[in-house]
Image (cartoon, rainbow, N blue to C red):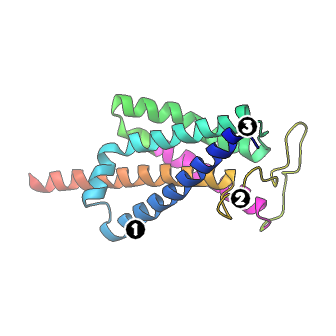
Amino acid sequence: MSPLVSNVNQILSIATIIGQGIIVVLILNLIIYKGSGMLSEIISAYGLLFAFVVVATATLGSLFYSEIAGFEPCKLCWFQRIFMYPQLILLGMAFWKKDKNIGNYGIVLSGLGAIIAVYHYLLQIGLVPSIACSAIGYSVSCSQRFIMNFGYITIPMMSLTAFLMIFFFLITQKIGDKSEKRDLSTMR
């Protein structure tokens, strides 16, 4: 493995761990504060930007792995890309136009992508059998691990973390916006 690929692996693996911490904080915030509070206000204001940054990082990371590192995407990787790549345009346009209503689309795309990523990760660590994911045509086997950092981080784990971060940023933003509207209506 080249030094560039090794360094990018380390950076993305550390970013994955940080992302998992953010997911825990967002979930706890939703459980404890139910969409109100300072964190929810920040996410309500900047959730689209945060989600866009995650999508951009995930998209560039997946392109790095396939185009620069030479890791051939498997069938499940392609399905995850199908749910990630359009969000780059959708969330980018939504942030630019200040359209918070686009969040529903990101929530659905990220939820579906996360389901595929969970299956892919469980397949790679050997907890589920391969249903239809053996090497097909020019694609590699979905159970092949190109990287394994910190004892658990693979490319599907990175993907799962990105999907969950987007999902919870957009959910928190949506709940925060509703809470904000409710607060404004009670002030009148």
Give the vertical position of 156 relative to 50 (above or below): below
Foreground residue among 151 and 49: 151
Residue stretch rendered in magenta on the structure: 104-126
Q: Residue furthest left?
A: 188
Cα–Cα gap, marks 2 and 3:
20 Å
Q: Is residue 156 left or right of residue 141?
A: left
> Which residue is under mark 1?
28
Q: Residue furthest bottom?
A: 32
> Which residue is under mark 2?
121
Give the vertical position of 82 relative to 37 (above or below): above
Image quadrant in which you'd find residue 149:
bottom right
Tell me which residue sits at (75%, 47%) in the image.
76
Measuring from the top left, give residue 77's x and y in whole percent: 72, 44
> Which badge, 1 or 3, is on the more N-terminal residue?
1
Foreground residue among 18 and 106: 18
For badge 2, the amino acid type reads Tyr
Camera-near label (1 vs 3) is 3
Measuring from the top left, give residue 24's x and y in whole percent: 46, 64
For badge 1, the amino acid type reads Leu
| Crowd around label 3: few <14 · some 14–19 · many ≥20 (10 Å) | some
> Which residue is under mark 3?
69
Measuring from the top left, give residue 42's x and y in whole percent: 29, 50
| Crowd around label 1: few <14 · some 14–19 · many ≥20 (10 Å) | few
Tell me which residue sits at (49%, 33%) in the image.
90
Does residue 137 appear in this view?
yes
> Which badge, 1 or 2, is on the more N-terminal residue?
1
Image quadrant in which you'd find residue 35:
bottom left
| Crowd around label 2: few <14 · some 14–19 · many ≥20 (10 Å) | many
For badge 3, the amino acid type reads Ala
Measuring from the top left, give residue 19's x and y in whole percent: 50, 55
Q: Secondary structure at mark 2?
A: helix
> Which badge, 2 or 3, is on the more N-terminal residue?
3
